Image (spheres, rainbow, N blue to C red):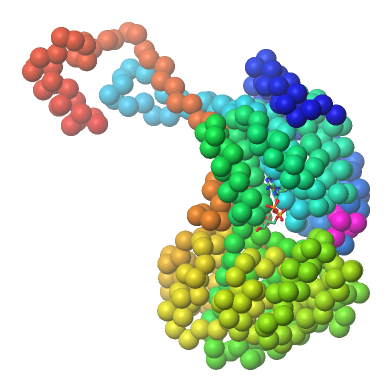
């Protein structure tokens, strides 16, 4: 394979040819990508199964299906999105026609994580290409099968000067970050996010950082316990709990804790059977290092359900933990695994004390039938996005921007927001020549100043 500096140089030269500005060229590539993805549907499921025992159902729902619908959406709307948008002219610049031109940044670097390895690399790739950029993509080194397949799909569709997938771990990522990019889109952990931001700062390269954090889920005593337990178990244990927007922990009203824990246990058994290890639907932890990390976090806590660990087979059972201390290992870092801590509250201040112990989270959930409680919690806290009476589902609506705030990230994408993320808005005024008021030209004098002041008061 070409060296990294060479790949970047070839893409830079290609971008200058203006070829990617042609919307029909972009559409041709995106349609070819759709065709290639359809042809590889089964191979994608097999790769995800090999990487971490992800079931075909979850792979369709949370990876293939989302990529496919995003591709369809962009193919359908690209001509409209890419067209210069005329905006109302200002009377102060009269006569004129005013526009926003959508302009690609140029050469984009996308770095992806392992937890939704297909979705979280293909979606930014699709939107960066749709917006007219070239892309170098680096998928995670931890999902070897899926990352290899992504490289094959990309090389079957795109000439290298438009898009290429580069395999490798930290050394490759570091070499990529040493190049000069026009945009960097990163999905991953907070510590690596800081490394990306630092590398980008060197050239003032704009970045989107899709990071993580400890996302809370509040449950009050007005809820239907069975339905709430069902939705929480689904959203928490999907992908083996390795989801950036999973509820990291729950804060449940003290008076329903006991009854709610019983419902959670029942729901885990209903979903994954008495022995989740033998369930075809329960994924494994991505590698031994992460399995050990999760096992360590269970050392000093009270387990009320689950708790089985098998490092060799990268298995952690769906586990419920009762009232861990906020300074325990489990509650210090993002869990990113199938362990659900259950905290309690009596007053809204208790909730605030827990949530404010952490950085601004990526997701936020509240289960309640009390509208004013829901509204007050949504308004009180800063977080990326969330849902009321469910988990995760805000990710699935492309009309909603998806991204974090503060330590959980910056920037957003999905649907048109994705296209906008990879486009710079050029403001252009096309000035008419048929009239040319002389008021702004020197020499000025008081009369002109008074006239201009009046103009600003009337029209400004
Ligand atoms: P990670 O930060 O370890 O790795 C992400 C990518 O960065 C990988 O491609 C990796 O090779 C690369 N990388 C690792 N170390 C690097 C370094 N020193 N320099 C440059 N690049 C480096 O994250 P992960 O373990 O793959 O994913 C889990 C994290 O991602 C969690 O924190 C999760 O919350 C977050 N996440 C966020 C979103 C989101 O959309 N906001 C989605 C999925 C995951």
Q: Nearer the viewer, residue 81 or 40?
A: 40
Q: Position of residue 206 (x, y in %)?
A: 54, 36
Q: Position of residue 102 (x, y in %)?
A: 55, 28
Q: Is residue 319 left or right of residue 379?
A: right
Q: Nearer the viewer, residue 6 or 442?
A: 6
Examine the residues drawn in magenta and state their main secondary structure. Answer: helix
Q: Name the residue rendered at 54%, 34% in the picture.
A: 202
Q: Position of residue 300 (x, y in %)?
A: 68, 82
Instruction: Report whether residue 219 is seen.
Output: no
Q: Position of residue 53 (x, y in %)?
A: 87, 62
Q: Residue furthest front?
A: 171
Position of residue 265 relative to residue 49, above or below, is below
Q: Name the residue rendered at 91%, 48% in the picture.
A: 43
Q: Is residue 106 left or right of residue 36?
A: left
Tell me which segment is drawn in magenta: 48-52
Position of residue 23 relative to residue 252, above or below, is above
Q: Name the residue rendered at 87%, 37% in the picture.
A: 152
Position of residue 23 relative to residue 59, above or below, is above
Name the image quarter holding residue 216.
bottom right
Name the image quarter holding residue 380.
bottom left
Q: Name the residue rendered at 39%, 29% in the picture.
A: 88
Q: Is residue 229 left or right of residue 435?
A: right
Q: Is residue 51 magenta?
A: yes
Q: Is residue 160 left or right of residue 236?
A: right
């Amino acid at each position: 394979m070409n060296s990294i500096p060479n790949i970047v140089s070839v893409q830079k030269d290609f971008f200058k040819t203006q070829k990617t500005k042609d919307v029909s060229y972009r559409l041709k590539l995106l349609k070819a990508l759709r065709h290639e993805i359809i042809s590889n549907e089964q191979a994608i499921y097999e790769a995800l199964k090999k990487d971490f025992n992800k079931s075909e159902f979850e792979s369709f729902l949370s990876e293939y299906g989302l990529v496919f619908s995003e591709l369809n959406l962009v193919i359908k709307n690209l001509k409209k999105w890419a067209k210069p948008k005329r905006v109302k002219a200002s009377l102060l610049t009269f006569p004129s026609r005013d526009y926003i031109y959508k302009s690609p940044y140029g050469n984009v670097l996308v770095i992806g994580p392992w937890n939704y390895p297909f979705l979280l690399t293909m979606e930014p790739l699709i939107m960066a290409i749709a917006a007219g950029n070239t892309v170098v993509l680096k998928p995670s080194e931890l999902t070897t099968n899926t990352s290899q397949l992504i490289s094959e799909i990309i090389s079957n569709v795109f000439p290298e000067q438009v898009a290429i997938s580069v395999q490798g771990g930290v050394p490759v990522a570091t070499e990529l970050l040493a190049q000069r990019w026009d945009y960097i889109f990163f999905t991953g952990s907070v510590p690596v996010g800081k490394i990306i931001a630092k590398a980008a700062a060197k050239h003032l390269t704009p970045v989107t950082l899709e990071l993580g954090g400890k996302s809370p889920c509040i449950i009050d005593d007005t809820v239907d316990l069975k339905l709430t337990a069902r939705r929480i178990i689904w959203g928490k244990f999907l992908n083996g709990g390795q989801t950036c927007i999973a509820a990291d922990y729950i804060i449940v009203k003290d008076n329903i804790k006991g009854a709610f824990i019983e419902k959670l246990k029942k729901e885990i058994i209903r979903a994954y059977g008495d022995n989740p290890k033998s369930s075809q639907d329960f994924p494994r932890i991505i590698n031994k290092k992460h399995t050990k990390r999760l096992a360590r976090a269970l050392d000093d806590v009270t387990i009320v359900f689950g708790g089985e660990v098998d490092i060799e087979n990268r298995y952690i059972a769906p586990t419920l933990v009762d009232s861990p201390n906020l300074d325990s290992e489990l509650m210090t870092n993002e869990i990113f695994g199938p362990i659900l801590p259950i905290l309690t509250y009596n007053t809204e201040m208790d909730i605030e004390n827990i949530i404010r112990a952490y950085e601004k989270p990526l997701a936020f959930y509240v289960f309640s039938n009390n509208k004013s409680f829901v509204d007050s919690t949504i308004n009180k806290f800063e977080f990326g996005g969330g849902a009321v009476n469910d988990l995760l589902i805000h990710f699935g609506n492309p009309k909603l921007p998806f991204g974090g705030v503060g330590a959980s990230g910056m920037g957003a994408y999905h649907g048109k927001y994705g296209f906008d993320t990879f486009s710079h808005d050029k403001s252009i005024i096309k000035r008419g020549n048929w009239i040319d008021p002389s008021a702004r030209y020197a020499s000025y004098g008081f009369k002109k100043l008074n006239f201009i002041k009046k103009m600003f008061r009337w029209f400004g």
